[in-house]
Image (cartoon, rainbow, N blue to C red):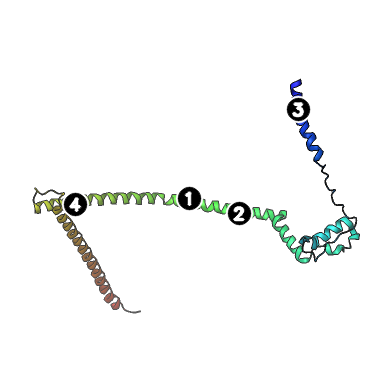
Amino acid sequence: MAAPVRQARPLLWLVTTLGQGARGYRARPPPRRSRGPWWPDPDDPLTPRWQLGPRYAAKQFARHGAASGVAAGSLWPSQEQLRELEAEEREWYPSLAAMQESLRVQQLAEEQKRRAREQLIEECMAKMPQMIENWRRQQQERREKEQADKERRARLQAEAQERLGYHVDPRSARFQELLQDMEKQHRKRLKEEKQRKKKEARAAAIAAAAAQDPADSETPSS
């Protein structure tokens, strides 16, 4: 019991010493509200802007009534303010008919989107067999082309070995140069053959047109 008392004595002495030189704090009372209306000085630069507008006048009229000297008619919004309020109300608080119409338009758009998607799926499914057939044909053509290229290259390699001799390594630079030269000649022959067939087809078309013109000219006019 004596130990806690001895520990508390320094604290009591500190509180007593500080209390003798300290003054009690007393807060200032809040400002009293004026019983009548109070209007700020418009020439004072420290006057808040909102106290010079209609909001402050409406506040004074709401607090003091007719004693504020504010005409009740001046507190009503102007025509422009009414239009702005009506536009804001239409935007943020639409009527039930407007909300129903908006919902109807939204549902109609979703229905049209769904139908368009279903129609696209049906068209794609209808084209699917032909697309699969085209893909298979392309794969077959690719395999045939690869096989033809492989056979052509093997044939060219055999011809090159016949020219250079079978003792030449196919991986040597001389053999590869000859092989490339033979491939160029082969492509050149294919190109010339293609051009020749094109010229023959053009000449045949011109001959057919020339043979048809005399027949048309010999037809008696009615």
Which residue is nearer to you in this view: 105 or 22?
Answer: 22
Amino acid type, label 3: Ala
Farthest residue, direction top: 1
Instruction: Place residue 63 in its image quadrant.
Output: bottom right
Label 4's element?
A: helix
Tally of numbered discs: 4
Mark 3 to mark 4 CA distance (whole Å): 109 Å
Mark 1 to mark 3 CA distance (whole Å): 90 Å
First-in-chain label (4 vs 1): 1
x and y percentages locating residue 69 in the rendered image: 89, 63
* Between marks 3 and 2 in the image, the one whose residue lies nearer the viewer: 3
The numbered dot on residue 121 is 1
Mark 2 to mark 4 CA distance (whole Å): 64 Å
Residue at mark 3: 8
First-in-chain label (1 vs 3): 3
First-in-chain label (3 vs 2): 3
Q: Residues within 10 Å of mark 4 (few under 14, many from 20)?
A: some
Mark 3 to mark 2 CA distance (whole Å): 83 Å
Mark 2 to mark 1 CA distance (whole Å): 20 Å
Residue at mark 2: 108
x and y percentages locating residue 120 in the rendered image: 48, 52
The numbered dot on residue 55 is none
Farthest residue, direction bottom: 221
